[in-house]
Image (cartoon, grey):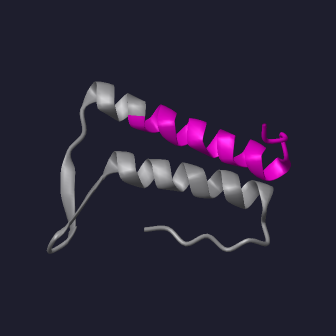
């Protein structure tokens, strides 16, 4: 069993936050829009990614984050 280290705690919080956002959009519906010619994005995608990045940045301010 994994110990409850800080990285694991942060990963769990980030996953829960993103999951809550995605579940909300799943229930309410989501509209897709084009990010580029062949690349679609939704508010659910953007909000979930921002939530994950914010949680990681708060816990590890010296880390860099590369998102989609």
Q: Position of residue 17 (x, y in %)?
A: 57, 38
User: Is residue 12 located in the magenta-colored stretch of the structure?
Assistant: yes
The quarter of the displayed image where residue 68 is located: bottom left
- The overriding secondary structure of the stretch rendered in magenta is helix
* Residue at the left extreme of this rendering: 37
- Whether residue 27 is situated above or below residue 13 in the rendered picture: above
User: Seen in the image, is 12 located left or right of residue 58?
Assistant: left
Q: Position of residue 6 (x, y in %)?
A: 83, 49
The quarter of the displayed image where residue 57 is located: bottom right
Q: Position of residue 12 (x, y in %)?
A: 67, 40
User: Seen in the image, is 67 located left or right of residue 52?
Assistant: left
Q: Tell me the quarter of the image containing the N terminus.
A: top right
Q: Return the residue nearer the eye: 7 or 34.
A: 7
Q: Position of residue 9 (x, y in %)?
A: 76, 42
The boundaries of the magenta stretch are 1-22
Residue depicted at 34% across the width and 34% down the height: 25
Residue depicted at 75% across the width and 47% down the height: 8
User: Seen in the image, is 11 located left or right of residue 48?
Assistant: right
User: Seen in the image, is 42 located left or right of residue 18?
Assistant: left
User: Is residue 34 located in the magenta-colored stretch of the structure?
Assistant: no
Residue depicted at 67% across the width and 74% down the height: 64
- Whether residue 35 is situated above or below residue 30 in the rendered picture: below
Residue depicted at 24% across the width and 39% down the height: 30
Q: Report the label total.
A: 0
């Amino acid at each position: 069993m994994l110990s409850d280290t800080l990285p694991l705690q942060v990963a769990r919080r980030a996953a829960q936050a993103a999951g809550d956002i995605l579940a909300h959009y799943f229930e309410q519906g989501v509209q897709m829009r084009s990010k580029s010619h062949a690349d679609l994005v939704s508010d659910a995608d953007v909000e979930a990614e921002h939530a994950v990045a914010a949680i990681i940045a708060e816990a590890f301010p010296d880390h860099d984050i590369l998102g989609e």
